[in-house]
């Protein structure tokens, strides 16, 4: 299907750190990076609305002459701090292993475009065909599989309406925490013009995870025969997916918590971990299963979500560690149990118990992460995966034009995942991105909205 609106390409350029500001450097791949070597990149869209002032409209010419130079200059300064993003995923000439290598003069692809689409429809919460958003998403150019770029950016101007900044990051170079560290630093430098004001600098010392190299080699052996297409095909939507955003407010989360805890009859049971994240994921998981109908109700359904390992490792590593440092949490339940009116209870129990088990060691079972996921995907049983975290505070990414009006994790449509984030306008609420075929999306939306109405009644 062709895109549903026109996007005019204005410029394709490359942006580097300031000349000779970074010496050549390489970073070895760690255990946490290995998982992502063959998986698709992460793509996000940040929508910014221009002030609604008829006397101060922003034309394409104004954007190119005034805003674009600041964006490029601040990006260059940001890449001096986050130099791996300008480098490439390649092989070490010493041992042949994967590494991230930066060579003086390396750069990132930077595309500028203009769209005639309705900005407000594209950044809205209602379901949109992914083809409407696809022209806003940059692609990582790969001409040499042995020398893969790690970051591509696209800025699309909607004259007199807004700007969309699209990012495409190879997951092997950074997890969500590191990606957002880069984005917020870039935004801060663009706003202030002063790189020295960035107090939170990325931490690159990979020796803090060197003791895990034995497990890294095990994982490399496991992915040697990994069939990406086999797993990707089993997770992809069966029809052209739509993207939509659903919000569960703080009051609804509190009501869910009270109801779940009130239904636990046995006071002697171990307390359940009942955080906002757990409750939101449980509610969405149940709506997803019920929207699928009878084809999953007599089967196991699986829920995978990430956990930041930085503070959970022994010894812990700095919160500003740049790279991947996320573990894999997984749980399952019977579709029949989740499809009931009280399905959020067992869903919360499954997710909450999985989080509580992390107290016994965040890397327990690490050797099964890859083979278990591959075998589950190949089995055809329903898998829901999660991207993002409310802790990233994506709506704090202000380039000087105000906070984003919408942040979208576009890449969830690749695997039918869901995304979670903080909400823009309410502290304590959670925003959920969902990717589903149209009919399934309609059923999900009805179940989601009706469920919240019943909570409030």
Image (cartoon, grey):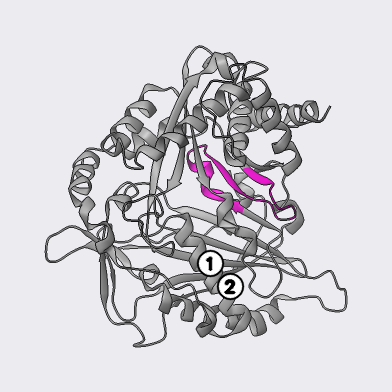
The quadrant of the picture occupied by the N terminus is top right
What crowding class fits label 2: few (fewer than 14 Cα within 10 Å), some (14-19), or many (20 or more)?
many
Residue 62 vertical position relative to residue 36 in the rendered view, above or below = below
Seen as rendered, the residue at the extreme top is 298
x%, y% of residue 151?
Answer: 43, 64
Residue name at image x 30 percent, y 35 percent: 365
Q: Are dots 2 and 1 in contact, CB under 8 Å?
A: yes
Inter-mark Cα distance, 2 to 1: 6 Å
**Residue 249 visible somewhere in the drawing:** no
Q: Quadrant of residue 278?
A: top right
In the rendered structure, which segment of residues is drawn in magenta?
408-432
User: Residue beneath label 1, please?
Assistant: 183
Q: Residue at x 61, y 82 (%)?
A: 192
* Left or right of 437 on screen, residue 374: left
> Where does the image place residue 347, in percent across and percent down from the top left?
56, 26
Classify the position of the C terminus by image quarter.
top right
Residue nearer the viewer, 2 or 106: 106
Using residue 178 as the reference point, say whether residue 425 is left or right of it: right
Q: Is residue 161 left or right of residue 94?
A: right
Residue 450 to residue 53: above or below: above
Q: In this view of the protein, can residue 253 be seen by the observer?
A: yes
For mark 2, give the secondary structure. Answer: helix
Q: Residue at x 36, y 56 (%)?
A: 316
Q: Which residue position holds label 2?
A: 187
Q: Position of residue 59 (x, y in %)?
A: 74, 76
């Amino acid at each position: 299907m062709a895109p549903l609106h026109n996007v005019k390409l204005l410029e394709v350029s490359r942006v580097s750190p300031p000349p000779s500001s970074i010496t050549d450097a390489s970073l070895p791949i760690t255990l946490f990076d290995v998982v992502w070597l063959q998986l698709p990149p992460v793509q996000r869209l940040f929508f910014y609305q221009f002030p609604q002032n008829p006397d101060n409209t922003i034309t394409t010419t104004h954007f190119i002459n005034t805003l674009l130079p600041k964006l490029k200059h601040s990006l260059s300064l940001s890449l001096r701090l986050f130099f791996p993003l300008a480098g490439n995923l390649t092989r070490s000439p010493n041992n042949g292993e994967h590494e991230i290598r930066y060579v003086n003069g390396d750069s990132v692809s930077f595309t500028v475009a203009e769209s005639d689409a309705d900005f407000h429809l594209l950044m809205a919460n209602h379901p949109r065909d992914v083809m409407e958003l696809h022209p806003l998403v940059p692609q990582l150019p790969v001409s040499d599989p042995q020398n893969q770029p790690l970051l591509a950016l696209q800025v699309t101007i909607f004259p007199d309406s807004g700007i969309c900044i699209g990012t495409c990051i190879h997951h092997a170079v950074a997890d969500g925490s590191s990606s957002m560290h880069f984005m917020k630093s870039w935004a801060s430098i663009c706003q202030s013009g002063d790189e020295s004001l960035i107090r939170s600098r990325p931490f690159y010392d990979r020796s803090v995870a060197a003791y895990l190299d034995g497990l890294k080699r095990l994982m490399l052996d496991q992915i040697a025969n990994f069939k990406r297409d086999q797993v990707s095909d089993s997770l992809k939507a069966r029809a052209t997916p739509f993207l939509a955003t659903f919000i569960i407010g703080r009051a609804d989360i509190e009501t869910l918590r009270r109801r779940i805890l009130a239904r636990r009859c046995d006071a002697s049971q171990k307390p359940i971990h009942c955080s906002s994240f757990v409750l939101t994921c449980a509610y969405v998981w149940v709506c997803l299963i019920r929207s699928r109908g009878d084809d999953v109700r007599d089967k196991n359904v699986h829920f995978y979500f990430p956990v930041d390992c930085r503070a959970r490792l022994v010894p812990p590593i700095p919160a500003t560690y740049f790279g991947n440092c996320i573990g894999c949490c997984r749980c399952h339940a019977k579709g029949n149990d989740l499809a009931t009116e009280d399905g959020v209870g067992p869903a919360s129990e499954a997710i909450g118990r999985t989080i509580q088990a992390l107290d016994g060691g965040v890397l327990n079972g690490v050797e099964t992460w890859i083979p278990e996921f591959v075998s589950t995907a190949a089995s055809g049983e329903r898998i829901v995966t999660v991207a993002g975290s409310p802790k990233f505070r994506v709506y704090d990414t202000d380039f000087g034009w105000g906070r984003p009006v919408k942040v979208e994790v576009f890449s969830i449509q690749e695997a039918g995942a869901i995304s979670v984030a903080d909400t823009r306008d309410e502290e304590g609420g959670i925003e959920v991105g969902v990717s589903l075929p149209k009919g399934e999306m309609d059923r999900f939306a009805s179940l989601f909205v009706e469920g919240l109405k019943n909570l409030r009644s």
